[in-house]
Image (cartoon, grey):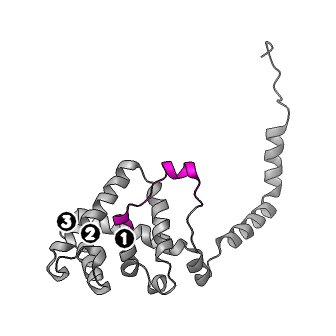
Amino acid sequence: MSVAAPRSADADDDRYRHNWLTRRVLESLVPVICPPEATELGLGADIVDHVELTMGALPGLFRAGLVAGIAGYDAAAALWPPAHGHLAHMLSPELARRWFESWLHGPTPMQRELVKGIKQVMTLAHYEHPVIQERLGYRPQQWIEKVKRRRLEVYADDIGKHHASITAPDPLPRRGGR
């Protein structure tokens, strides 16, 4: 089940799309960042698609920095002795978790902020997934409808008065034919 918006031919030209490396790195981070149910339910591709939509909404320069940071995160793993020259997206789940944690608690603010940002958008994508929301019993539309009905009942008179004040003829006389 994909949560990505349908694509039209002209929308594809302007829309941000993950490059192959960004997609591979993010897919490899699903079991590291998201709760186990994401992997168990096979939601990885949907989560990465949602991250793609989120990144598409970011300002171009910010997004370019994020993509570059993800590539750097991936490449730097090859220099980490436990990785034995492998890129981050090629690491075993346990090594991938350790690599991510080393950046999350890393020596530079850039490392820490990059992986915190990645974690935030991936966590958002996980909890925005309809399957996860249903499992949690999170049904925002039902709540919205309930609150809407209650507000309309409580404030019906005020809404009516305001509507009447907006649609009533102008009480001030007009001068000069304007």
Circle 1 crowding by C-alpha within 10 Å: few under 14, some 14–19, many from 20: some
Figure quadrant of residue 108:
bottom left
**Residue 34 painted magenta:** no
Type of amino acid under label 3: Thr
Pointer 1 and pointer 2: residues touching (CB < 8 Å)? yes
Task: Please provide percent x and percent y for residue 21.
Answer: 34, 65
Stretch of the chain drawn in magenta: 6-25
Figure quadrant of residue 89:
bottom left
Q: Considering depth in this image, is 20 or 132 the residue closer to the camera? A: 20
Type of amino acid under label 2: Asp
Name the residue tied to disc 1.
Answer: 24
| Sequence-first tag of 2 and 3 | 2
* Residue at image coords 48%, 87%: 40
Circle 3 crowding by C-alpha within 10 Å: few under 14, some 14–19, many from 20: few
Task: Please provide percent x and percent y for residue 20.
Answer: 37, 64
Name the residue tied to disc 3.
Answer: 108
Residue 64 appears left or right of 158: left
